[in-house]
Image (cartoon, rainbow, N blue to C red):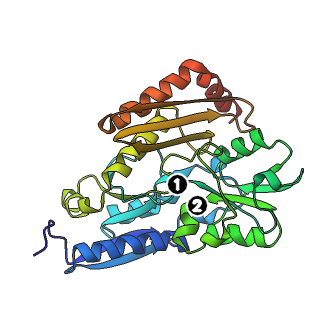
Amino acid sequence: MNQYPSAPARIVIASRESRLALWQAGHIQARLSELHPHSRVEILGMTTRGDQILDRPLSQIGGKGLFIKELEVAMQEGRADLAVHSLKDLPMEMPDGFSLTAIPLRENPRDAFVSNRYPGLDDLPAGAVVGTSSLRREAIVSAGYPQLRVEPLRGNLDTRLRKLDEGQYDAIILAAAGLIRLGLGERIKAMLTPEQSLPAPGQGALAIEVLSSRADAVAWLAPLNDSETAHCVRAERAFSRALGGSCQVPLGGYARMENGVLWLRGFVATPDGRQRVSGELRGAPDEDESIGQRLAQHLRDRGADAILAALAAGQ
């Protein structure tokens, strides 16, 4: 007998149509089918504005919300019961009427160095072009390797790899999780440590979004939640939220559990990496959001406000 709350006869998952997004939706589809074998679980693939506009950096066209609006409309209209996202692609403030109900076990959260010619960042010659879609990664590379050129890189994972293979870039930096999930781990030349490149809040984690009013869905999705991952990403997102984290802010935030203690590290920087304030904080997992907020305040006390003000003035 199924020990979990009964799910409807038909469950529809809204997803972007990139190969990675559909893999993620398919992963949750398989998990739900195991949990609720009497339910027919389907995927509704959709193209979002974030997928359509590829000629400008995300920070210039409206931010992360462009990847989720259409999926949320599908839930509002009753065409889908839930949406599956890469958590790092979600805005730090969820829209009214929607909530994150489950955070499954996290994949590798680190950044990956990908190149067809060079084994690592230290091996790139002066003037080499590094592609990234992230101001966070731009700040990290610019600060540590000022001799390199950092250029914008948009598009889904396959598009980014194709641009590298065409010679438009000498190397690109991507989230390791996406490459691993699509069976492309062999493309990773080097895995960057958190000390080299502190991950983005939520990187490597998936998020399941539902209408806040769907208490039924919250109940039958609950078994998908991994409490350790959820505590970590809640701390990361609270840290980012308290600093106004968005695509316009070069910011890293990464938490992990060590012997039952939550350890959060974070930084905020200018895009050129010349100004940077970082810190870390430890505490009980149940204090996840408080830890994030307190670390953000520590950074503000040490000069982060000046960086944030300069970023706002430059927008």
Earlier-in-chain disc, 1 versus 2: 1
Q: Which mark is residue 176?
A: 2
Rendered position, 19 above or below 70: below
Quote the CA–CA distance across marks 1 and 2.
7 Å
Which class describes the residues within 10 Å of circle 1: few (<14), some (14-19), or many (20+)? many
- The answer to whether the residue labelled 1 contacts the one labelled 2, judged by CB atoms less than 8 Å apart, is yes
Q: Quadrant of residue 164?
A: bottom right
What amino acid is labelled 2 in the image?
Ala
What amino acid is labelled 1 in the image?
Pro
* Quadrant that contains the C terminus: top right
Q: Which mark is residue 109?
A: 1
Q: Quadrant of residue 146?
A: top right
In the rendered image, residue 83, in percent from the top left (x then y), is placed at 38, 64
| Residue 290 in the figure: left or right of residue 152 | left
In the rendered image, residue 261, in percent from the top left (x then y), is placed at 37, 38
Question: Quick one: 75 or 280, which is closer to the camera?
Answer: 280
Callout 2: helix, strand or loop?
A: helix
